[in-house]
Amino acid sequence: MNGGDVNTGDIDADDIDVAGFRARVRAWLDDNDLSPAPGLTFDGQVAQLGRVRRALYDAGWMRYGWPAEVGGLGGPAVLRAVLGEEVATRDLAEPGIYSMIEVLAPTMISYAPPELAAEMVPRLLNGDEQWCQGFSEPGSGSDLASLSTRAEPRGDDWVINGQKVWTSLAQFARRCVLLTRTAPGHAGITAFFLDMDTPGITVRPLRTMHGVDEFAEVFFDDVVVPGDRMLGRPGDGWRLAMDLLPHERSTCFWHRIAHLYSRLDRLAAETGEADDAALGAAYLALHTVRCRSHETQRRLADGARLGPETSVDKVLLATAEQRLFDTARDLLPGVLELDETPWRSEYLYSRAATIYGGTAEIQRNIIARRLLDLGKD
Ligand SMILES: Cc1cc2nc3c(=O)[nH]c(=O)nc-3n(C[C@H](O)[C@H](O)[C@H](O)COP(=O)(O)OP(=O)(O)OC[C@H]3O[C@@H](n4cnc5c(N)ncnc54)[C@H](O)[C@@H]3O)c2cc1C
């Protein structure tokens, strides 16, 4: 057995039975109540995320599906999806911030010097740290390749100047996976793994429409980062950004879909299934993205390199999420508008589904041009 020091029983990660793994996770979660206190603020949700990760890491569950080199216990990545699904279904942690690990840890494993990944990734898995993703800039969101935050060499170091925006969790993050410009064009984008307490970094939280300081503007004034914190080589930043995509659109989505199913169940219970047709349509949209996401994860597990076809997953997810909360608005008349309920904040947050991770328009452009070969217009 891998990792005999954890109390996950006698699971052999190299010969894992996914259904058995799920059953054991469920039994463990039944015995170890990680439920959040009611009515948490966003700060409280971030703290709860750390608590959940710490408990799951100490018990071993958080380590399955990750390689031993970064503190994992091995086994297929689908184990992470199963764990995330159980966490989301039980509402133990906010699914968006829980999923960030799926975006940032694989990137570190692929691009960081191995000793840096070995030192840092366990701190993310075990809940000690939050990290953030510094890609978008004012004027460089959809057109990410136009980013202009500069990194210039100085001896063995690099000096960073510029600004990022919409950086989720920046105000809580100890580290940042940062894209910078070191030369013109796509081949002039270089990534760094930056400590957020480095002098010269200013973080200004931004309030979302649903009323929480979830993301931030981040300013860089002569921020010095050691050369050994570069991810890959100079000019690898665009490739890193493109490699991040499969993670942002596969295991991450699985957690979110599980969360949305739990909300559909809640809606059906609260409305007494009064409108079967509307609930059925919301279910159909969710089931469609779940089937698609299942296929994407299967292909990833088979070693496929994911690409533009994951834009279909993104469009389906955003459609299903907004359909579900539109249905809640219609079936709970006045509740979203007049009451301070979770339905209201979740409805408002669902509007962001067609923006984060690439807007719906951009996904449709990709589908039209790269999958359907419809040309540029
Ligand atoms: C909740 C949330 C969390 C986020 N977290 C992060 C994060 O952690 N890190 C990070 O780096 N970024 C993050 N983002 C930013 C996100 O990636 C960008 O908002 C997104 O890529 C769009 O970029 P933009 O906001 O600059 O909009 P723009 O690119 O300015 O787009 C504005 C509008 O124009 C449309 N448009 C633009 N170009 C075209 C085109 N060629 N054809 C058709 N329509 C077009 C867009 O679809 C959109 O409707 C987050 C965003 C949200 C909402």
Image (tube, grey):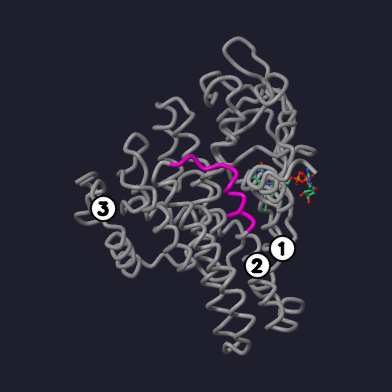
Residue 362 vs 270, above or below: the answer is above
Badge 1 amino acid: His
Decide if residue 150 is on the left or right side of residue 40: right
Q: Position of residue 297 (x, y in %)?
A: 45, 52
Q: Quadrant of the C terminus?
A: top right
Residue at x 51% of width, y 68% of height = 37
The response on whether ligand 1 sits within 8 Å of label 2 is no
Q: Secondary structure at mark 2?
A: helix
Along the line of sight, which residue is nearer the eye, 91 or 326? Answer: 326
The response on whether ligand 1 sits within 8 Å of label 3 is no
Query: Distance of mark 2 from mark 1, alpha carbons?
Result: 8 Å
Residue at x 50% of width, y 57% of height = 293
Q: Secondary structure at mark 3?
A: loop
Q: Which residue is mark 1?
A: 210
Asked whether the beta carbons under mark 2 and mark 1 sit within 8 Å of each other, the answer is yes
Instruction: Decide: few, some or many residues near mark 1? Use Cα within 10 Å; few <14, some 14-19, many ≥20.
Output: some
Magenta segment boundaries in residue numbering: 304-315
In the picture, the disc for residue 51 is: none
Q: Which residue is mark 2?
A: 346
Residue at x 37% of width, y 55% of height = 56
Q: Position of residue 25 (x, y in %)?
A: 32, 62
Magenta stretch: includes residue 306: yes
